[in-house]
Image (cartoon, rainbow, N blue to C red):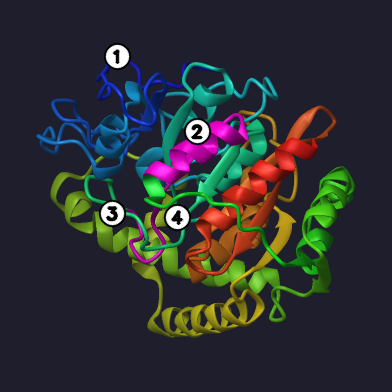
Amino acid sequence: MSSPFVPGTSVRVEGRAGGPLDGLTFAAKDLFDVAGHPTGGGNPDWARQNPVPARHAWAVQALLDAGATLIGKTVTDEVSLGILGENAFEGTPLNPAAPGHVPGGSSSGSASAVAQGLCDTALGTDTGGSVRVPSSFCGLHGIRPTHGRLDLMGMMPQAPSSDTTGWFAREAQTFARVSEVLLGEPIGEAMPTRLLLATDAFGFAEPAVAEALRPMLDRLRTIVPQVEEVVMAPAGLSVWGRAQRVLQPVEAWQTFREWIERDNPRFAFSVAKGLVLGAMSSEADRGWAELMRREVRGRLRHLLPPGTILAMPTTPFPAPKAGLPLDVLTPLRDQILCLCAQGGLAGHPQVNLPGATVEGRPVGLSLMGARGADTLLVRTAMAMEKLA
């Protein structure tokens, strides 16, 4: 296992003295621009074939202005096209909560750096699960904010209709402090009034995961007075996963096509395969996937009015072993996407709560809310930590 920081780089930018995050340190996934330093995107040819940024990404600047100090840029799956955290060119960052197992990706280095205690918080991105999955695998608080809420200036895109900035922290108090800055809203005291348990998502997860999360659900029931069981995806979680598996590669191909056709960059096989599949996607498949996205958005809008939150396993299993062959990894990725697809399809905020393990490896409980209810989820995370 390798360092969470991009090999051969040294980055440090002091935060503004006296800000609300004064004294905290952070790292930034190597998709975020840092002025005067190349943005590598986890690929050996991206930085060489693109200019060095002259200004910080919005999220980096926001944390610096709030007083946090940037201490490094972190490893990412190539051009953020990965979910397990293994990079063929830069290595696999250590998962300190499960040594010998993957940290989760594509924000692998950011999660690893926070989990190791090398920084207080770190910026990641989440398109198809890239903050939620490493949060679960590494035992961290992590958030995928409401899609479109944050300024993504200076963040390398992948699939813009799903891309978000996210962040990690080990404890809820730090998570809340960073969230207030980046969300631009006080966390407040409001708590959810209704809790939905996604029975299909708990049924899809491995039985040991559902059992490990039961004590966390019991604590959650003491916080939220009204509890109901629901089927989140009547069409099927695998159908939601398939729709995201069509739309995301198509957009990724559109994002990177000009660079690929111009410079013929190097890619790991799994990354190249995903881009090729995006390029070859049929109009019929794209049309079906867009209709399914519309259906998913309607379903979650119906399930999640203001004040309601939904609980589900973040991942169907704990972190797999590092270095598994592709024929083993592919079905694992597909299973993960079945529990993560709703993020990219519907854009609702989702927070991972740490606190459970399976055979010593972390697994997370996710809370999802109405669009714009990001701070409600963070407030609930704070309440849950006090009960732990």
Residue at the front extreme, as displayed: 189
The residue carrying pointer 4 sits among few (fewer than 14), some (14 to 19) or many (20 or more) residues within 10 Å by Cα, namely many
Any mark on residue 151, and which?
3
Mark 3 in CB contact with mark 4 (< 8 angstroms): no
The residue carrying pointer 2 sits among few (fewer than 14), some (14 to 19) or many (20 or more) residues within 10 Å by Cα, namely many
Q: Earlier in the sequence, mark 3 or mark 1?
A: 1
Q: CA–CA distance between discs 2 and 4?
A: 14 Å
Mark 2 in CB contact with mark 4 (< 8 angstroms): no
Q: Does dot 4 land on a helix, a strand or a loop? A: loop
Q: Where in the figure is residue 264, as x and y percent of width and height?
A: 21, 45
Q: CA–CA distance between discs 2 and 1?
A: 17 Å
Q: Nearer the viewer, mark 3 or mark 1?
A: 3
In the picture of the structure, the residue carrying the numbered disc 1 is 8
Is 368 above or below relative to 306?
Answer: above
Q: Earlier in the sequence, mark 4 or mark 1?
A: 1
In the picture of the structure, the residue carrying the numbered disc 2 is 108
116 displayed left or right of 256: right
Q: Does dot 3 land on a helix, a strand or a loop? A: loop
In the picture of the structure, the residue carrying the numbered disc 4 is 127
Residue stretch rendered in magenta on the structure: 158-181
What's the amino acid at mark 4? Thr
